Amino acid sequence: MKKFFFLIVTYLLISVNLNAETIKVDYRVSFGIVGEIGVAHAKLTKENNKYEIDIKLRATGVTKLLSGDRREEHISRGYIKNGILISNFYHIKKTHGSKKRDTIYKIDHNRKRVVKIDKKWKDGKLYKEREKILPYYSSDDLLTLYFNLDKYIKNKSLSRDYKFRAVGAEKQKGFVDIHIPNKSELEEYKDLLGDDKDCWYAKAVVYQKIFSSDKGELLLAIGKDGITKKAVLKDLLLFGDVRAYRIKN
């Protein structure tokens, strides 16, 4: 459970899409009979033509105990062009117990390349550092992609499959799949997420070995304001569904 919690909550939160100058959104994540397993806080700040996204994740309850009080923070910085967020920098910070890991992506739009820097510490000492150029380029990272979805997908009622590229999705070879459900599929979405006339529905495919198959299905109910109201990660191996819901905005 400690290994997949942060992966799950990251994918739940990166679907948040905020449009004001500064907005904060909080989520709680629950897991079957275990109950609450974590909380997350998302913040988007815009100033002139620049933006910063900051998402903080932390385990609670038994998950906090099992994970060694594991925490994550995802930061994206860049600029805004024609209403689209363009990433220059994506930083992932992870800590649990005496271990710390930083992953930094620097996006060079002129040369159309991405440099990844990975650093690991234990007991305050840096013991591993490596740098490499990714085999793909994108102007989106995992955070900006989901913040930009509202503009990328014009007709949200038309069933269609989309394939996007995002920095930070190496396990998926840089690709992120998004599916807009058809009428027959929509019943399942509404059954799991609620029938909300103010929402549009989508599915993000998450490729990870921890799931019951080679991909996990993350169902999303996204409000007209662009903010995800509810999300369900379906059918984890042996564990059932994980659910997230917005508690404050």
Image: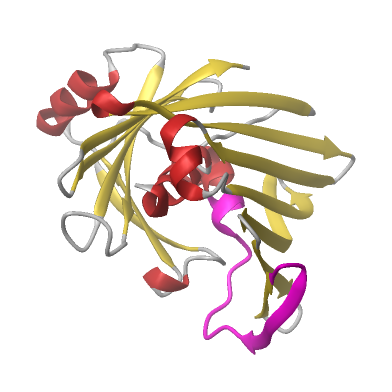
Identify the residue at image location x=31%, y=62%: 208
Identify the residue at image location x=52%, y=45%: 146
Position of 154 with respect to 21 (left or right) is: left
| Quarter assignment of residue 153 | top left
Measuring from the top left, give residue 29's x and y in whole percent. Answer: 43, 29
The boundaries of the magenta stretch are 122-145
Position of 235 with respect to 127 (left or right) is: left
Asked if one can make out residue 153 in the rendered structure from this viewpoint, the answer is no
Out of 214 and 190, give the one closest to the viewer.
214
Q: How many marks?
A: 0
| Quarter assignment of residue 78 | bottom right
**Residue extending furthest left?**
184
Q: Is residue 193 magenta?
A: no
Measuring from the top left, give residue 6's x and y in whole percent. Answer: 47, 48
Q: Is residue 138 magenta?
A: yes
Identify the residue at image location x=70%, y=59%: 87
Measuring from the top left, give residue 27's x and y in whole percent. Answer: 52, 26
Display colour scheme: secondary structure
Quadrant in which the C terminus is drawn: top right
Asked if one can make out residue 91 in the rendered structure from this viewpoint, the answer is yes
Out of 241 and 184, give the one closest to the viewer.
241
In the picture shown, does residue 180 fall above or below 132? above
In the picture shown, does residue 215 fall above or below 244? below
Measuring from the top left, give residue 192's x and y in whole percent. Answer: 22, 23
Position of 114 with respect to 208 (left or right) is: right
**Residue extending furthest right?**
48
| Quarter assignment of residue 202 | top left
Position of 224 with respect to 236 (left or right) is: right
Out of 90 and 103, give the one closest to the viewer.
103
